[in-house]
Image (tube, coloured by chain):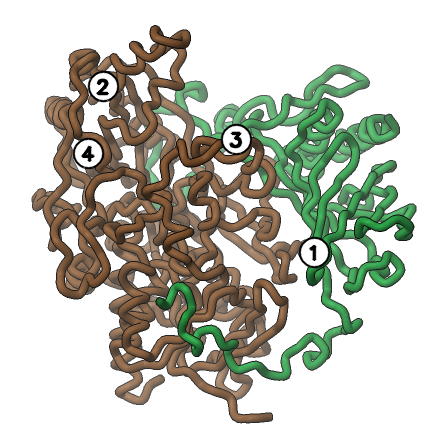
Chain colours: A green, B brown
Amino acid sequence: MFFNQANKKANRPAAKTATTAKARGKKSTGARRLYSVPVWMHERVFAGEFELGSRSYKLTFAPALAELAGNALQLRGRLTVSDGKAGLPEVKDARARLAGIQGGIGAGPARYKMLATGATPGPTESPTEKQQKSGENQKSAGEPAQPEKAQASSLTITENTGPTAFTAVMFFHLDALDGRALGVPADMSHVQLNARLAPKDPTARSLHSLYTALTGALAGEQADERLAAALVRELNQVLAG
Amino acid sequence: MGTQKIYDAIIIGSGASGGMAAKQLTEHGFEVLVLEAGPPVNPERDLNSHKNPWDSMYRGFGKPGWRDYDQWMQDTAGEFSRHFYVKDTEHPYTTDPGKPFMWVRARIVGGKSLHWGRFSWRMSDLDFKAASHDGFGDDWPVSYKDIEPYYDKAEDFVGVSGNQDHIPHLPDGKFMPGMPLTCGEHMLRRGAEKVGRRGISARVAMLTAPPRPHMKGRNKCHFCGNCGDGCDVNASFSSIASTLPIAQATGLMTLRPNSVVRHLITDTNTGKARGVAYVDRLSYQEYEAFGRVIVVAASTLESTRILFNSKSRQHPNGMGNSSGVLGHYLVDHFGGIGAGGFFPVLAGRTPVNEDGKSDGLYIPRFRNVSKDTKHPRFLRGYGFECASQIWRYPGVAKDPARAPGFGSEFKAAVRRWYTAPVYMTTRAEMLSRFENHVEIDPNGVVDAWGIPALKIHCQHSDNEREMARDAAETSEEILRAAGAEVTWKGGQITAPGRIIHELCTARMGSDPKTSVLNQFNQCWDAKNVFVTDGASFTSSACQNPTLTILALTMRACDYIADERKRGNL
């Protein structure tokens, strides 16, 4: 049956050509390139696994310092890779620069309350409410004029926008790593950490709401550099334990 | 370098559109290579419509936390169907803070056709020529008359149940018998009629009569009601039940699973595509394949991503993007708005065997279909998907207000209300706006194979919000007219993507300056590239899109065959 690929023709790779990384002129270390590693947040640490061939490796990144590099969040801390044996070296000051986020859908974290002031940063109203209060409207040519201005409270909002929005994943780019030095037979020059924020412990929950507020302050509709700087200070307090 | 095999056509994707393209083109005598990003299907292992909750220690809900762990955006995945869906850990995409998009993806032979909702509605000229009706956006470059013969062919091939309802803006077709309504659905239909709305049996791509001769290996639906886990009797239409076996039987199809496409390869002399570069999902080995025609049918956003990633000297902004509209005009239908409750008159009655059919009552669009129905605050319209039936798990068992406590008291409450639930939910058109778009993530986020990922920008506008308000009010009105006790109403508009009807990002049009494709799904910028999935839509209407995708694919493939005969491809 075709879906079991009993057809030998179908099993055969299509015409293989000289299109390996080397043949294309890409940098080749002779090892497979490791593009991304999914990690999950446990307390303050991001931890995950990846496979190369038949071997499995554990990766942990323990940020100890947050800073703003340009307009991007950068985390610095210890990065370790383990293949189950002791003695693999570690990177003491690995740097991970935030490249993007994925907005979450479903139940998110509680809104972050600033340690310093107790205030709740970020949107307190839905985009619709904000828009209507400001008198803006997203009308395009051809849409009907609105003879009766809708009341903000009577219009339905989209799930997980406004005050219920949250960050589900943060994508970090690690500074180039030397796979060989880490004992990993892979090109680790451009590794992306896909940091999933699905906390199971109080510290991680607190960090989830903080990361949500911070990514909103950096790149959200209500981006706010001063707020972002204040949140980075608070993040450093939490990371310091 | 040795001689390269050149296929007549390479088809990217094996879902509804890709499977149909494989069938159509092989029947036209094309030798085709189908590249599917996901694994092959083992029906005995992977199709689980007859697997029962009690077969699992997790009772069908899955191991606690699995969704949070690696499939947080695959909303319709369940314990017995999660293998149909991608792992979000391997397939990133980005959004801006506060603007989420739920991108549900199936990477497996058969794609989303393995678990789709099966609603099969035709669009009409109210939809194809919507801009002419209300002035917003652009008309499609085709009319209903152009597509009608292919709707006929698609329905005849697929097997769609339904009735002749004589609704001009929801054209009738070639149907198998419609699924009967339940008692509660009859009550709801009468309630709708009291307030001037029609209610009809849902039209679904499931066999309600003995299979036609071409439907080898398929069977009449026996209403087990668990379609989303993969129909293992092939009563519902899917690529693996319908199109791919026919293509396979021609001996002209090579299907290669686990083939993740990086980009199309451009012929530097002509600017046309000469092949496809792809990576093996498991071995990470890189390959190229060559073809005279490339059919891109990887699903709306994946197809768009492939085109964006196909940059070359001739196509510096991506294949098909000379107009600059590639990736723009993204829409998804929205749901989440409606009402639900119970029919007290049906509570406590003796259960009868009317559960299990997959779909119930549909209330077609009634706003802005004529001058008399023009709504003052929004354009376009919505329909209601409605049901009064049980399926496998009675929702009331999770409603502590109606079924409190535990033990015998709880069981009695569940039994009392088991026969009486009713709900209505919208499927509504989202206006196709330039500002809702996707792009390659500007900061270099990639997937597990190093392929640049998408960044998705999509938000609802006041038009959708006004429509949602109207739908909430109308659904409650209909339920009350039907005699239901309303226990919930309103809701929130579903996040873009959640309805899994993302469309329009490589739109067809009449002008190469404002569209990506011509009326035959052919790329203006590379005439041997065809995009046949939902990306090709100009606007979405409010009807479920798959039947139209199938019809457009059949039409495009006939055109490809004709053009080859003419020597134009």
- Number of numbered markers: 4
Question: What residue lies at 74% left-to-right and 46% top-to-bottom?
Answer: A98
- Seen from the viewer's position, the closer of residues A140 and B400 is B400
Q: Amino acid at mark 4?
A: Leu
Q: Report in which chain the residue with disc 4 lies.
A: B
Quadrant the N terminus of chain B occupies: bottom right
Against B181, is A14 above or below? below
Query: Upstream in the sequence, badge 3 or badge 1?
Result: 1
- Seen from the viewer's position, the closer of residues B105 and A220 is B105
Mark 1–mark 4 distance (CA, rounded to whole Å): 49 Å
Say if mark 3 contacts mark 4, CB within 8 Å.
no
Where residue B128 appears, x then y in whole percent? 25, 54
Q: Which numbered mark, 2 or 3, is in the foreground of this view?
A: 2
Quickly name the residue at label 2: B420
Q: Report in which chain the residue with disc 1 lies.
A: A
Q: Report in which chain the residue with disc 2 lies.
A: B
Question: What residue lies at 47% left-to-right and 56% top-to-bottom?
Answer: B107
Where residue A59 appears, x then y in whole percent? 78, 47
On residue B361, the disc is: 4
Query: Upstream in the sequence, badge 4 or badge 2?
Result: 4
Quickly name the residue at label 1: A51
Taking the view exactly as shown, the residue that stands out farthest to the bottom is: B2
Q: Within the image, what quadrant is residue B471 found in?
A: top left
Mark 3–mark 4 distance (CA, rounded to whole Å): 28 Å
- Seen from the viewer's position, the closer of residues B119 and B313 is B119
Quickly name the residue at label 3: A106
Q: Within the image, what quadrant is residue A189 found in?
A: bottom right
- Residue A71 visible within the image: yes
